[in-house]
Amino acid sequence: MTSKTILFLAILFLSACNNKLPDRKAITVIKGGTVLDLSNQGNSVKDLQDAYIIFEGNEILEIGLLSDREEFPTNAKIIDANGKYVLPGLIDGFAVLNNQSYANAYLYSGVTTIIGVDGGRRGPFYFEADPSPGYYMLESVGDDPKPDSAHLADLFKLHEKGYKIALLKYELRPAQLRFINNEAHKLGMGTIGELGFTSYKEAANMGIDAFVHTTRYSLDVAPEEMHKTVAANPFSDDLDSPKWKYYQYLFNLDTADKALQNHAEVLASSETYLMPTMSLLYADLPDSKNPWDEAVAAILDPNDINNPVDRKTGRHNYTDEQQENYSAVGLQELKIETVYRNAGSHYLAGSATDVWGTMPGISLHNELGLLTRIGLSNREALAAATTNFNKAFGWKTGKIEKGFEADILILDKNPLDKLENLKEIDVLINNGKVLDRNNLLKNE
């Protein structure tokens, strides 16, 4: 055989292999539909119309335009998405999973990943759920005053147990926070700040990945003495507690206040993401809807939920004084967060389920709606529950891209037109598996 013949055969072979994956056992192809572009915090608009996605197991292998591909593996499972809308599965950035019904509720709602929190009012995390959203577990460092070595030992223990997020808490002083944040990043762990004795301005300059709860990361606008008092006693439902005195200060704060405006500039100029968890107070807003009216609520037991809302009214059974205070905080939280948004802050979506009546899956959708109320576009809100998590923590989830997890939603209607369309799920793919949504409502 001549060298020219060998060269010709080689070229022929390469041409035959070009743009073709080998036949494999578990290849799935999504054909047609529009893949929504949620990159760049929702500021990019390069949607792929009439696209295809190829995945095997829980890994996306390829994405492109149907017009650029002549054929697919002969034994691939084909999912027809023609005329539909495709986006990554949703991520809830602060949520508990207590039982199988919680897992089913998340999945039915399109939530395929959560940052898992547990303990205290939320109860233990249920690791045996099947099917289950994926989870990245979170635990705190800095609940109590300790020397650096003890905080570091706590961090190492969390890492050894497989925790992916360190929640950096109130008792960490500035030097300690910087030290622990740096060590967490060396271990490949993400960091979320819920701070007290270190200001959020200092923390933002240190490169904390995210801050959680509007009422918490607004603490810098409070007078210094109030700030210290809340840092020392951050938790209480008593309206006379330091926490509630601070909350009352917040809901009387003019949004043009110089301290608030300055703090907004600090947050917006940093690389730190904000996770407002405004859904904690959703039921206390005057125009809230009853979460028990959602179809998936039928599989949830109110006895499992911390401070659930009334099934008939969708409201808490508070005294008039309590309701007045909770509603005032909820309404003011929207105004304050609008200031942060207008300054240019960037966001992650988290529901804080299941404290204060928040509910799995349902409350993340409420959170997305509230994000649009503070000024995010529908596309930006969707990015806050998908691609922004990859940007914040570097995880291979939340994007439809080669090498990422195969968590995918195929919708009948476009959520960019109306956010409610996000509930119109035709196909739910979790960890590379197509799930029957109707079976999730059976909760057997």
Image (spheres, grey):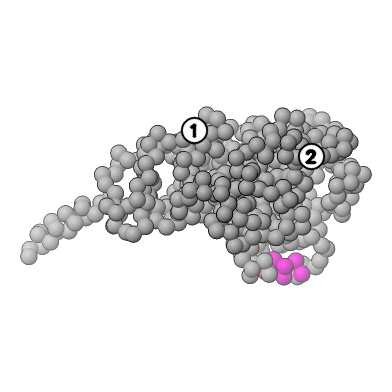
Q: How many marks?
A: 2
Does residue 253 show up?
yes
Residue furthest to the left:
1
Q: Quadrant of the C terminus?
A: bottom right
At numbered mark 2, what does the secondary structure look like: helix, strand or loop?
loop
- For the residue pair 203 and 387, the one nearer the viewer reads as 387
Amino acid under disc 1: Asn
The tag on residue 414 is 1
Q: Residue at x 60, y 43 (%)?
A: 296
Real-space CA distance between mark 2 and mark 1, rounded to the nearest whole angstrom: 33 Å
Q: Is residue 151 magenta?
A: yes
Find residue 158 and report its horizontal and vertical position in percent.
67, 66
Is disc 2 surrounded by few (<14), some (14 to 19) or many (20+) residues within 10 Å?
Answer: some
- For the residue pair 21 and 228, the one nearer the viewer reads as 21
Find residue 201 and report its horizontal and vertical position in percent.
75, 47
The picture quadrant where one finds residue 375 is top right
Is disc 1 surrounded by few (<14), some (14 to 19) or many (20+) residues within 10 Å?
Answer: some
Q: Is residue 149 magenta?
A: no
First along the sequence among labels 2 and 1? 2
Q: Which residues are magenta?
A: 150-156
At numbered mark 1, what does the secondary structure look like: helix, strand or loop?
loop
Residue marked by disc 2:
316
Q: Residue at x 48, y 33 (%)?
A: 413
